[in-house]
């Protein structure tokens, strides 16, 4: 039985050896043929490149000769000048220009003046072509073999030919290829096989003048020779294989473009090509053997350490390097699994308030320490009741098993206590707060995947402000409704603008007596199918997404159109103020666009006022000053709106040349100390008068507020105490029935 098994093993080994040897033989033949073909194609391509170089050389020589000939024919010169110019054109040894003056039958060259020779007549004058190559010939005076190009031309009855001669040795030096460590060489031949230019290579036979004489003597197949000759006559390109000098050679031939029947031929010993191919095959086999051996070793090593590698890869893929918490992708995988088992979970989205500032103040190393400390605190607090991950930067996720809400709030406070204690070791006065958005994984709410719960907890996180009394916020339906409402507004805003659903309302401004109508403020209302969307719902959305720029310009043009129509009808009017967002100050063509609209409706100067909120101080004050002055020079009045609403600074009044100061209604209501607020208002109005600013109090709602403003000398009142915002049609009625100021 044992012998039987041994025989089977030997048979299997023999079969394996035969298979390997057979595979190697097939591989050897395939690679041998492929490499040979590739090498020959490379040589053919190199020959083509050399042919292109020769074409470029010929084209350049013809172009130069044409330019020289033009000058010779167009400018009449004596013989001495002509000879001097031809001599100056020779820039390299072994070349010269010849000018044949056909009218005088003279040949001018660097050697002097002579009559046109019979050779020149035969080669050129009897040639029907206007320009081109001349078949190599022996120069009359020196007997040196020359390559030449010629160009024929005429000017005002004067005919001539310019010839550029170049020695064969120069051409051989520059246009003969060498391949495979100088084992290959090249010829230039004609379609009959005549060798026009031979390489200086030692294997280039110098006794034969025709290529086919070399081939015939070597006993090559006549059918192959005939095929080669036929291809040359047809100006074809290709490869042929002939015996030459007792060995097989590869002939690569390419027609020369600028000639009728010249070819560039490269000859390379087939043994040189096969030597390289054999070397590559041997190297490949050796390399493959080495690779097989190395792979075998690697496989053996892999099998030994597979478990350890698997653990390392899992750690890299599933755990954050800094905190050793789950990565975001691993967290989602685990969360999906846990949600399939139970829906009694909370999703918590965490980040550190102003973490970027902490990094800048204390360095990134300290920031990393805070992140690691937070991670350790979360591990300790969560334990086995949930899973944790670090998304990126200072953002974390916790999926926590359902607790009572009071316990969850205490959990959030514990997180902040832990991280604040660590930060205190730096003796920093800055408080570190972890903001937490919480979403209950309510089984009654159907979401396609865990991403939905994460998004909702993130939405709740965004509700936690830096000055909020709590460090956490719970996701609720109101947040969801607000998100949908915002999306609905953004989906409809462009269409609403195109369909003119945004309407201009005007709120009158009166003097303190309420008897004189002094102006109005343009306010926007969104009327959608007889339903009004309040500005508080859409203005904040537009200010975030930038659509406020389009809306502001739309309302400005509506006001200009309204005033322009009243001007055409010669009707009474009062100045109207229009709000503009601070975002306009980032638009390079803001002033140009607004002035263009104003001028299009021929609005007189001083009739439109632009209201700019005082948070403009957040921008470059010099840039703002320049823009305000440009607007004023163009006839627009500028006012500072909501003065005192949160960004108040005397720099606004000191540095910016506003015309009107508009007091925010916050000074008139909800004050803990009414008398103190009134003194502030009194001082602001007195100061405004001293620097020649008109004052407007907005948001005036009661007779008590009106009485006080009358006492302190406020110029204009805007508020419900006199009038609410109204459609333009209602405002027009007031312009007819009430006393107006300035414009009538």
Image (spheres, rainbow, N blue to C red):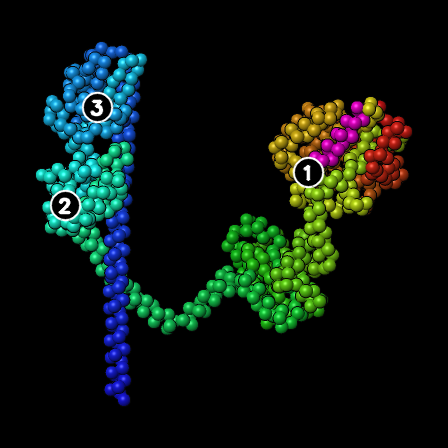
Give the position of the N terminus as an image quadrant: bottom left
Q: Earlier in the sequence, mark 3 or mark 1?
A: 3
Residue closer to the observer: 132 or 495: 132
Image quadrant of residue 378?
bottom right
Q: Which of marks 2 and 1 is nearer the N terminus?
A: 2
Instruction: Give the secondary structure at mark 1.
Output: helix
Q: Can residue 381 be seen in this view?
A: no
Give the position of the C terminus as an image quadrant: top right
* Residue at x 12%, y 43% (from the top left corner): 214
* Residue at x 51%, y 62% (from the top left corner): 320
Q: Which mark is residue 550?
A: 1
Q: Distance between the residues labelled 3 and 1?
A: 80 Å
Q: Where is residue 363 in the image (x, y as percent from the top left)?
A: 52, 51
Judging by the rendered image, the residue that carries numbered circle 2 is: 215
Q: How far apart are marks 2 and 3 (CA)?
A: 34 Å
* Residue at x 69%, y 40% (from the top left corner): 548
Q: What is the chief secondary structure element of the magenta stretch?
A: helix
In the rendered image, residue 567 lying in the magenta stretch gets the answer: yes
Q: Which mark is residue 126?
A: 3
Q: Position of residue 173 (x, y in %)?
A: 18, 35
Near mark 2 (Cα within 10 A), the count class, few <14, some 14-19 or many ≥20, is some
Residue closer to the observer: 218 or 624: 218
């Amino acid at each position: 039985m044992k012998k039987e098994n041994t025989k089977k093993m030997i048979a299997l080994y023999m079969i394996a050896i035969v298979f390997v040897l057979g595979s190697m033989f097939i591989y050897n033949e395939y690679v041998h043929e492929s490499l040979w073909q590739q090498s020959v194609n490379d040589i053919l391509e190199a020959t083509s490149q050399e042919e292109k170089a020769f074409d470029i050389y010929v084209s350049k020589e013809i172009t130069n000769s044409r330019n020289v000939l033009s000058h010779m024919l167009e400018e009449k010169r004596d013989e001495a000048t002509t000879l001097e110019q031809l001599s100056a054109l020779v820039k390299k040894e072994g070349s010269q220009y010849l000018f044949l003056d056909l009218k005088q039958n003279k040949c001018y060259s660097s050697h002097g003046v002579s009559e046109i020779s019979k050779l020149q007549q035969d080669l050129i004058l009897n040639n029907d072509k206007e320009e081109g190559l001349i078949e190599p010939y022996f120069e009359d005076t020196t007997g040196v073999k020359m390559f030449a190009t010629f160009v024929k031309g005429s000017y005002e009855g004067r005919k001539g030919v310019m010839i550029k001669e170049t020695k064969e040795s120069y051409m051989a030096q520059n246009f003969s290829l060498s391949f495979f460590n100088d084992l290959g060489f090249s010829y230039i031949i004609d379609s009959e096989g005549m060798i026009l230019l031979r390489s200086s290579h030692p294997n280039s036979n110098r006794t034969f003048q025709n290529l086919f004489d070399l081939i015939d003597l070597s006993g090559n197949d006549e059918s192959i020779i005939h095929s080669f000759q036929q291809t040359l006559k047809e100006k074809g390109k290709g490869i042929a294989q002939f015996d030459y000098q007792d060995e097989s050679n590869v002939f690569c031939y390419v027609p020369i473009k600028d000639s009728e029947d010249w070819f560039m031929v490269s000859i390379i010993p087939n043994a040189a090509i096969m030597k390289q191919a054999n070397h590559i095959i041997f190297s490949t086999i050796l390399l493959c053997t080495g690779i097989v051996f190395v792979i075998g070793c690697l496989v053996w090593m892999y099998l030994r350490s597979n478990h350890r590698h698997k653990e390392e890869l899992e750690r890299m893929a599933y755990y954050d390097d800094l905190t050793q918490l789950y990565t975001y992708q691993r967290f989602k995988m685990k969360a999906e699994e846990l949600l399939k088992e139970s829906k009694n979970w909370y999703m918590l989205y965490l980040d550190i308030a102003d973490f970027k500032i902490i990094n800048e103040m204390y360095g990134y190393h300290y920031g990393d320490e805070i992140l690691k400390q937070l991670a350790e605190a979360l591990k300790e607090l969560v334990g086995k009741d949930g899973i944790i991950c670090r998304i990126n930067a200072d953002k974390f996720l916790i999926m926590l098993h359902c607790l009572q809400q009071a316990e969850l709030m205490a959990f959030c406070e514990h997180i902040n206590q832990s991280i604040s204690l660590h930060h205190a070791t730096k003796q920093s006065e800055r408080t570190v707060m972890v903001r937490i958005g919480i979403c209950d994984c309510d089984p009654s709410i159907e979401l396609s995947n865990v991403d939905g719960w994460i998004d909702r907890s993130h939405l709740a996180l965004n509700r936690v402000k830096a000055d909020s009394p709590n460090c956490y916020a719970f996701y609720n339906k109101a947040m969801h409704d607000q998100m949908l409402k915002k999306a609905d507004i953004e989906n409809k805003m462009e269409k609403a603008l195109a369909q003119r659903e945004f309407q201009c309302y005007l709120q009158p401004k009166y003097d303190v007596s309420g008897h004189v109508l002094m102006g109005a403020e343009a306010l926007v209302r969104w009327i959608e199918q007889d339903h009004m969307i309040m500005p508080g719902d859409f203005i904040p959305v537009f200010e975030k997404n930038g659509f406020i720029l389009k809306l502001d310009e739309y309302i400005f043009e509506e006001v200009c159109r309204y005033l322009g129509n009243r001007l055409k009808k010669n009707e009474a009017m009062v100045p109207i103020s229009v709000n503009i967002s601070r975002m306009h100050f980032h638009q390079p063509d803001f002033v140009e666009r607004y002035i263009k609209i104003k001028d299009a409706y021929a609005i007189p100067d001083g009739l439109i006022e632009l209201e700019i909120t005082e948070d403009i101080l957040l921008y470059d004050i010099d840039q703002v000053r320049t823009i305000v002055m440009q607007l004023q020079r163009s006839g627009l009045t500028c006012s500072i709106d909501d003065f005192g609403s949160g960004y108040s600074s005397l720099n606004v009044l000191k540095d910016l040349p506003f015309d009107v100061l508009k007091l925010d209604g916050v000074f008139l209501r909800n004050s803990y100390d009414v008398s103190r607020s009134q003194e502030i208002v009194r001082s602001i109005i007195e100061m405004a008068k001293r620097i020649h600013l008109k004052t407007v109090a907005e948001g005036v709602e009661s007779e008590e507020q009106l009485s006080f403003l009358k006492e302190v000398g406020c110029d204009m009142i805007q508020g419900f105490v006199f009038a609410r915002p109204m459609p333009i049609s209602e405002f027009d009625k007031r312009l007819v029935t009430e006393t107006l100021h300035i414009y009538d």
